[in-house]
Amino acid sequence: MSLTRRQVTAAAFGAVPLAFAVNGVAQAAPSKSKPRTLYIAGDSTAAQKYADAAPETGWGMAFPFFLHKDRPVANHAVNGRSSKSFVDEGRLDVILGAIQPGDFLLIQFAHNDEKSADPTRYTEPWTTYQDYLRLYIDGARARGARPVLATSVERRKFDADGNAVPTHGDYPAAMRALAEEERVALLDIQALSLALWQKLGVEETKTYFNWTATEQDNTHFNPPGAIAVARLVAGELLRRRVLAPQDVRRLDAEIPESWITWPPATA
């Protein structure tokens, strides 16, 4: 991070009252008169899906089931976006225009950052990927909100011996390194989901992904898969002490698939 950006961030912190620190980084005191919102910036694996896409389900659709009502979710994840294209389209600016002191910004990208043939989305793990992620981190902190990095959930891929295989290359390692450098809480959803797919095995994982009579999708989830991944995210937020025990619920409870709904497609 350049000195100029640090100076800008410091100046922004001076504009809000500081009451506590997280991992040595000053945070704005959350208002006791309003809920603390969890914003999601991410791609199709987390995004809201609509009736024309059912049963495809983003994990962000199931995420609120694991949080108390005073921790609302603002899901800004969008299909097909990378850390770069999300910024270039002004979507990060929309979040930063709404986020408040004490809120959280969950950041999950990599699936589309990996697409080297598409210059509008591609980032290189150890350079531009980290550079773009810093924009989210700095933007949240400048507004008194807390950034949280989440490595991308794994695709469904197994080798000939039935071992779940990682598919994200260096992107998870690059995010882990950045989280340590910037002292940002990290939810290692890539590692946790890979372990879950390994536990479930080749056949049972099909019941978590968007496998239908006409489609064999090993990237996107159906309701059981979205619920399982949202449970991982909520559990990690508790384990990393981003959220307190009173903030979460149902971590060990069965969530009915019928709770997932797909609103009518937007124009």
Image (tube, rainbow, N blue to C red):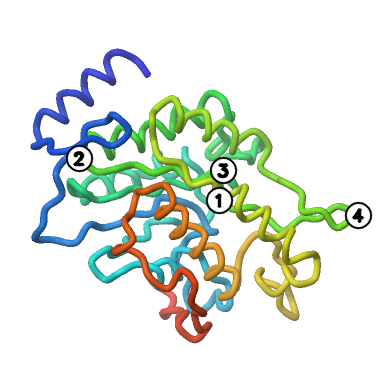
- Residue 64: give x, y in percent of width and height: 37, 69
Residue for badge 3: 110
Q: CA distance from mark 3 to mark 2?
A: 26 Å
Name which of mark 2 and mark 1 comes first in the sequence: 2
Name which of mark 3 and mark 2 comes first in the sequence: 3
Mark sitting on residue 38: none
- Residue 267: give x, y in percent of width and height: 39, 72
Give 266 or 137, whichever is nearer the viewer.
Answer: 137
Residue for badge 4: 160
Residue 198 lies in quadrant: bottom right
Asked if disc 3 and disc 2 are in contact, CB closer than 8 Å, the reply is no
Asked if disc 3 and disc 4 are in contact, CB closer than 8 Å, the reply is no
Name which of mark 3 and mark 4 comes first in the sequence: 3
Q: CA distance from mark 2 to mark 1?
A: 25 Å
Q: CA distance from mark 1 to mark 4?
A: 24 Å
Mark sitting on residue 144: 2
Is 36 drawn above or below residue 191 in the view shown? Answer: below
Residue for badge 1: 189
Kind of residue sitting beneath label 1: Ile
Name which of mark 1 and mark 4 comes first in the sequence: 4
Name the residue: 37% across, 60% down. Answer: 75
